[in-house]
Amino acid sequence: MGATVTSRVLDLLGAFDSDHRSLTLSDLARRAGLPLATAHRLVGELTRWGALTRLPTGEYVIGRRLWDLGLLSPVQSGLRQAASPFLHDLYGATLATVHLAVRDGCEVLYVDRLAGHVSVPVVSKIGSRLPLHATGVGKVLLAYAPEDIRTEAFARLTRVTPYTITQPALLADQLKRVRTAGFATTGEEMSLGACSAAVPVRGEADQVVAALGIVVPDLRREQARLISALQVAARGIGRTLASAQWK
Amino acid sequence: MGATVTSRVLDLLGAFDSDHRSLTLSDLARRAGLPLATAHRLVGELTRWGALTRLPTGEYVIGRRLWDLGLLSPVQSGLRQAASPFLHDLYGATLATVHLAVRDGCEVLYVDRLAGHVSVPVVSKIGSRLPLHATGVGKVLLAYAPEDIRTEAFARLTRVTPYTITQPALLADQLKRVRTAGFATTGEEMSLGACSAAVPVRGEADQVVAALGIVVPDLRREQARLISALQVAARGIGRTLASAQWK
DNA sequence: ACTTGTCTTCCGTTCAGCGGAAGAGGAACC
DNA sequence: GGTTCCTCTTCCGCTGAACGGAAGACAAGT
């Protein structure tokens, strides 16, 4: 089975996650299920190349070169760059935490995030994944997702807070409204004390490529103004995307 | 020499760069110097793991999983997150293109960048590397770099524009001033029509961990105000870094 | 139909990777 | 001082996984 050198290398890299940003050699070996001597050699090669870096403490972390590579990913290069200035505008206009997200399978993948110094309790981090049904951007992405994804998502409406929507019928109704109104909202469905609003970002062929959202303590005041600010920004991103050297 | 499986895998990944974000299998094999059959197998494994993704066109790009990994790098997680809100403040106060950079060997590595809709001609991109002697952030980083890096950098003062500083004595003098004044400036030394100012960002033990800079069309007006805005932001970043869960 | 690309699969040889074992620090405790 | 328990590093002989030439499949262009 999985016993190729390549898979071992990848297992080593996969040993890192957001709870384990730095690991000792023995940890790496343990987590990757490799004998220490083997891990030692592979990690040595990875470090020499720049994929890993050894801290003064002896622990290993993901190196600069892998960071570089990540930046070449299409997630990063196209969408984020096009959106960046608009995210600012939006932040300036709303002073809310701003989110840019895409759908990755049955989850929301946060591509960019822009927060002020103080902010409402927000769970997301750039690169983190959350369920589609409990966040503003998630509802937007789900509303425009293909059939099979929707059924899969409906199959697991996990409860996160007392306000999380777990009834399929209710969610289906909300998604319909998202499609007609052009925006989605949530009220403390993902984390208490946080409401959100989100709109779709449309690419060249008018299909939904991402979602743009904000998180605020209270949505009732000013909802109209916030939504329109979101829509202006989303249209701007879409236009920039279409005219970009998407190469 | 370098003919281990690991090195081959890394050569494949290294075949991607900012001018080659997507590559066909044959391109990959060519650029990595591998026989097609070998590349085929390795690329297959990488794709299965999620390090690469195959586009509908058949070309390969860096996959989401590598993007994720890059986000775990300390560059990303510590420095960028701590700096993000301050970069905004700075943008708001100056309306200039804002740069956050670290030194990587003998080059400036741009860690974050924040630009408005229209901007002065700026060469940098996030993740790009530029020589240390021709940019504002570069001069700051060089001024506080260890001896050996300085001598190495002085050995190759390549000319970029007519205003680029290529005389070692002049540069040495400027660096001394950077250390006493606490900031660096450039005037069209990297790209015509662009001036810049930069200050050091100091970490826990007061050592310089990064540089913060802005790019503007003209520096003479308002220089004092810009520098002081930079310094306020840099201090803020430093304080946040020190108190962060640097894990 | 022929050329020139691409990608994919097969399979026997061989040499690179494997990993047990032993040893070299280093820290903590008695 | 010794003992225990970590960590990391190096060595080396055996073996099976990786290699890559070759042949074939497919697509696009002429």
Image: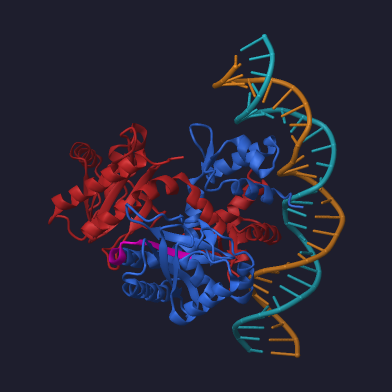
Chain colours: A red, B blue, C cyan, D orange
Nearest to the observer: residue C9 or residue A242: A242
Over which residues does the magenta segment extend?
A: B92-101
Residue drawn at x 37%, y 51% is A110
Q: Residue D20: horizontal and vertical position, in percent?
A: 76, 37
Residue B247 appears in the picture as rendered:
no
Q: Residue A27: horizontal and vertical position, in percent?
A: 59, 64
Extreme residue in the left direction: A221
Q: Residue A201: horizontal and vertical position, in percent?
A: 30, 42
Q: Is residue B2 above or below residue B138?
A: above
Q: Is residue B173 magenta?
A: no
Q: Is residue B100 magenta?
A: yes
Q: Is residue D1 above or below residue B65?
A: below
Nearest to the observer: residue B117 or residue B34: B117
Residue drawn at x 36%, y 72% is B230
Q: Is residue A211 left or right of residue D24?
A: left
Extreme residue in the front direction: B162
Q: Is residue B83 left or right of residue C16?
A: left
Q: Is residue A100 left or right of residue D28?
A: left
Nearest to the observer: residue B129 or residue A104: B129
Q: Residue B118: horizontal and vertical position, in percent?
A: 33, 52
